[in-house]
């Protein structure tokens, strides 16, 4: 692939921003779970414990192996085919769940302009799904260029909202007291789930590393840019929300569009809602770009049908994989937003665990292999680092189980499909032995 057809640094940064965040859309439930004093605390602490270890792991492993398939290939080299199948299966499913969230959110923000739109949820979601499929089939560079435009459309409303809010407060905001007092364990768990979901996906962008110009350097700078932008936007939107004087439950139920209307009038609310439409389209397109590369490498290893490898003759994109992913997501849009978040984070956390283990195993197996980016910790230090996100993950899951019986179905469903990875492995072994006998 020629350099001009590869993704450049700014395009990659925009895609990573959309893949991980796409703006604070979807962060609203945190305000309901954690309240005025707990929301900002969870927002600041969770990324340190959950994201920083994941980001560092992704940067080291991607610098060591910047190849198509990303995290799947890391686990394969470190732990073998069996756990590579686990990783591919879990992350493939988590990304399907993740993708299904954004058409649902698209309808929520479209409802600001068309309040009677909800009965048409399914056809609208399908239009978004297949519009993004077409864009991805056209190639990675069109996705990257579109991501830059959509990123600007996502950030612009919040830049205006922040400017107006700061002006009205004389440029000063008092940081609320950090406290979890009065927040039940179940609310804490669901608040963690919300923040974790709004910060996950750093490894997704590694599946197309061979399609990026100067991948090691580009990923290092792009991840840094995206992380700073996400943190700044999240911090200010939560700070302004809790000190706006508007009821937090109103923001939760009516999205950040209502906050825009409260602070700047109906026009600003509409601007924020429009940004929400751009966000959901951009996130969906960017995440589809990453997940569509996973079936290809799994098919190369015989885990999936070979025809998923098929590339478009003109655009050189895995169009069969893109279409297959879109078909699966078309079915999953029937779930609710809350159910999808629980399944999403649960499956993602399981895949992330294998990446952490792979980091340590590769350090032990290949200690002298060149790593342009290397976490400045020894193996013992890496084990301590990994305990941080695992602790957050465990608390979030326990809190979700304690919240209500309504979360049992998505949580148990996620755990069941995780176990199915071993069933698929046994089927693979059986079919391999059978083929050898034939």
Image: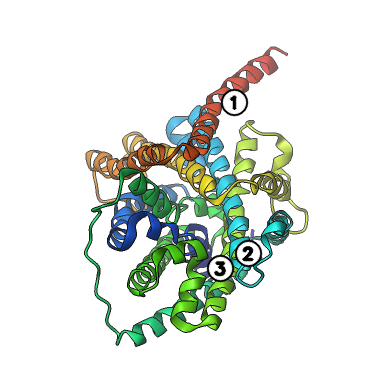
> On the rendered image, what quadrant is the N terminus found in?
bottom right
Q: What residue is drawn where x is 66% and y is 34%? A: 304
Q: Which residue is mark 2?
A: 143
**Residue 202 occupies quadrant:** bottom left
| Closer to viewer: mark 3 or mark 2 | 3
Q: Which residue is mark 3?
A: 276
Could you say where residue 201 lies in the image, as x and y percent from the top left?
47, 52
Q: Which residue is mark 1?
A: 424
Residue nearest the viewer, comparing 286 with 398: 398
Is residue 198 positioned above or below 231 on the image?
above
Q: CA distance from mark 3 to mark 1?
A: 38 Å
Task: Work out whether residue 68 can be spotted.
Answer: no
Element type at marker 3?
A: helix
Element type at marker 1?
A: helix
First of labels 3, 1 by sequence position:
3
256 left or right of 321? Answer: left
- The crowding category of the residue bearing disc 3, from other C-alpha atoms within 10 Å (few below 14, some 14 to 19, many at least 20), is many
Could you say where residue 266 lies in the image, as x and y percent from the top left?
54, 81
Residue nearest the viewer, comparing 145 with 346: 346
> On the rendered image, what quadrant is the C terminus found in?
top right
279 left or right of 229? Answer: right
Element type at marker 2?
A: helix
């Amino acid at each position: 692939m020629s350099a001009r057809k590869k993704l450049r640094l700014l395009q990659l940064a925009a895609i990573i921003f959309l893949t991980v965040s796409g703006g604070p859309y979807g962060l609203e439930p945190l305000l309901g779970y954690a309240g005025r004093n707990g929301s900002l605390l969870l927002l600041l602490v969770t990324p340190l414990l959950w994201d920083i270890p994941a980001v560092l792991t992704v940067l080291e492993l991607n610098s060591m192996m910047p190849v198509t398939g990303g995290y799947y290939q890391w686990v394969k080299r470190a732990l073998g085919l069996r756990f590579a199948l686990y990783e591919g299966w879990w992350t493939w499913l988590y990304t399907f769940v993740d993708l299904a969230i954004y058409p649902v959110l698209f309808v929520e923000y479209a409802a600001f302009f068309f309040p009677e739109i909800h009965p048409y949820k399914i056809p609208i979601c399908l239009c978004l799904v297949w519009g993004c499929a077409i864009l991805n089939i056209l190639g990675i560079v069109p996705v990257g260029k579109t991501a830059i435009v959509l990123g600007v459309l996502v950030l612009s409303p919040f830049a205006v909202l922040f400017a107006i809010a700061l002006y009205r407060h004389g440029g000063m905001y008092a940081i609320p007291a950090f406290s979890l007092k009065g927040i039940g364990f179940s609310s804490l768990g669901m608040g963690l789930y919300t923040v974790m979901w709004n910060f996950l996906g750093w490894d997704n962008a590694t599946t197309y590393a061979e399609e990026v110009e100067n991948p090691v350097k580009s990923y290092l700078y792009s991840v840094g840019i995206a992380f700073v932008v996400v943190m700044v936007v999240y911090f200010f939107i939560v700070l302004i929300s809790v000190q706006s004087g508007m009821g937090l439950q109103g923001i939760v139920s009516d999205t950040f569009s209502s906050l825009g209307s409260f602070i700047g009038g109906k026009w600003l609310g509409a601007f924020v809602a429009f940004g929400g439409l751009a966000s959901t389209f951009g996130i969906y397109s960017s995440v589809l770009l990453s997940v569509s590369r996973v079936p290809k490498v799994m098919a190369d290893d015989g885990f999936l049908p070979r025809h998923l490898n098929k590339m478009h003759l003109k655009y050189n994109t895995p169009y069969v994989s893109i279409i297959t992913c879109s078909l699966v997501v078309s079915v999953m849009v029937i779930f609710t937003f809350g159910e999808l978040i629980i399944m999403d984070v649960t499956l993602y956390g399981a895949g992330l665990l294998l990446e952490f283990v792979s980091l340590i195993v590769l350090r032990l197996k290949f200690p002298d292999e060149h790593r342009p980016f290397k976490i400045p910790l020894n193996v013992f230090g890496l084990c301590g680092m990994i305990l941080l996100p695992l602790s957050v993950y465990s608390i979030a899951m326990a809190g979700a189980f304690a919240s209500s019986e309504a979360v049992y179905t998505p949580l148990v469903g996620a755990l069941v499909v995780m176990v199915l990875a071993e069933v698929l492995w046994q089927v693979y072994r059986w079919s391999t032995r059978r083929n050898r006998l034939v």
